[in-house]
Image (spheres, rainbow, N blue to C red):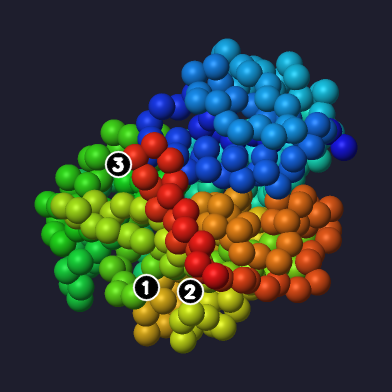
Amino acid sequence: MKLLILEYATASGIKDPSINIEGRAMLQGLLEDFNSKDTSFLISNKSFPLDKGNCQPKTIYADVDQWLKENLSYYDACLPIAPEEDFILYRLTRTIEEQGLKVIGSLSPGVLTCSDKWETYQAIKNVAPLIRTERIFFDDMGGNSNQIEDFFIHEKQKVIKPSDGVSCSGVQIINSESSLMRAAGKIRENNTSPFFLIQDYMEGDCCSVSLLTDGQEAMPISLNLQKININNSIVNYNGGKTPLEHPLIDEAFSVAKKSVESIKGLHGYVGVDLILGEEVYLVEINSRITTPYIALRKIVNFNLGRAIFDAAQGILPSSVQLDGEAHFSKGTLEMDLTVIR
């Protein structure tokens, strides 16, 4: 089977290190897991070269979408990694499906649901414990003063975020109506969605669960710590470690598993973000390979890339064992990874 790997940042030639570093690391891991002449990958002529092994680079000089429309027919399957914002991952997934290829990952219905956090919450509100959340349309803010005031009655600290952000993009901590207005203005400048979300601020450990799913059953692989820092009320993601031992690990696995299994179209690797405080709270679901993949592939007892491929065919691993602990963080030009056995 001829496989094409599409990692959006490297295929597009994005230079911003905050976006490019994680994408390059995930792509490099996949090239090592799929070290075959039957595997090709897209890379922009503006991107730095990678260690391709036996995989075949396909250098592109223009628009990714146009290249796909002209060349996808040469392949049997495509594994996409792309941001949910502006529905980029959904658009690429639809293109792959329309060209008749096997998607090694989530199908478009699942991607669409998870590309909008509000739609995700509606899909799992009877399945998972959620943080109190309100959706506020930018154009209605002047007439929603009571709604906003009510949100600040009991708790002063709140979280404001775009509905389609990734990797803490646009997430800010606010404590007043005036700080809300400023934060909402920043989100509106950088996002096309007509609304944003405001949530209660929850104390606890920021974590994620990595899972494999065949579209019916979801198998948790690991609980991962997320290294989050807050600078001038702006939330930033800088990496993490896996696995994380935690008193709420069983509940975290249960919440993640039930949530993934309840959304139609999720396949392959899925990441579920959680806050573990007095209880487990679900934050969002990522319908794609996430950054902990680069660490997990070093300590899990099977080839993780191949397991993602198999899950898309309906086959899950018989068991999961992790050997050691892996720490990962954003460096200046690349992801730093340390494995402790």
| Disc 2/disc 1 C-alpha distance (Å) | 11 Å
Farthest residue in the front direction? 341
What residue sits right under mark 2 in the picture? 244
**Along the line of sight, which residue is nearer the eye, 129 or 62?**
62
**Do callouts 2 and 3 mark residues in contact (Cβ within 8 Å)?**
no
Q: Amino acid at mark 1?
A: Asp
Q: Amino acid at mark 2?
A: Leu
Say few, some or many: other residues with alpha carbon within 10 Å of mark 1 (under 14 / 14 to 19 / 20 or more): some
**Do callouts 2 and 1 mark residues in contact (Cβ within 8 Å)?**
yes
Residue 90 is situated, as x and y percent measured from the top left of the image, at: 61, 39
Residue 331 is situated, as x and y percent measured from the top left of the image, at: 37, 45
Q: Choose the circle earlier in sequence order: 2 or 3.
A: 3
Looking at the image, residue 196 sits to the left or right of residue 270; the answer is left
**Along the line of sight, which residue is nearer the eye, 329 or 92?**
329
Say few, some or many: other residues with alpha carbon within 10 Å of mark 2 (under 14 / 14 to 19 / 20 or more): some
* Nearer the camera: disc 2 or disc 1: 2
* Nearer the camera: disc 2 or disc 3: 2
Farthest residue in the top direction? 61
Q: Amino acid at mark 3?
A: Ile
Looking at the image, residue 27 sits to the left or right of residue 3; the answer is left
Vertical order, 194 against 49 (above or below): below
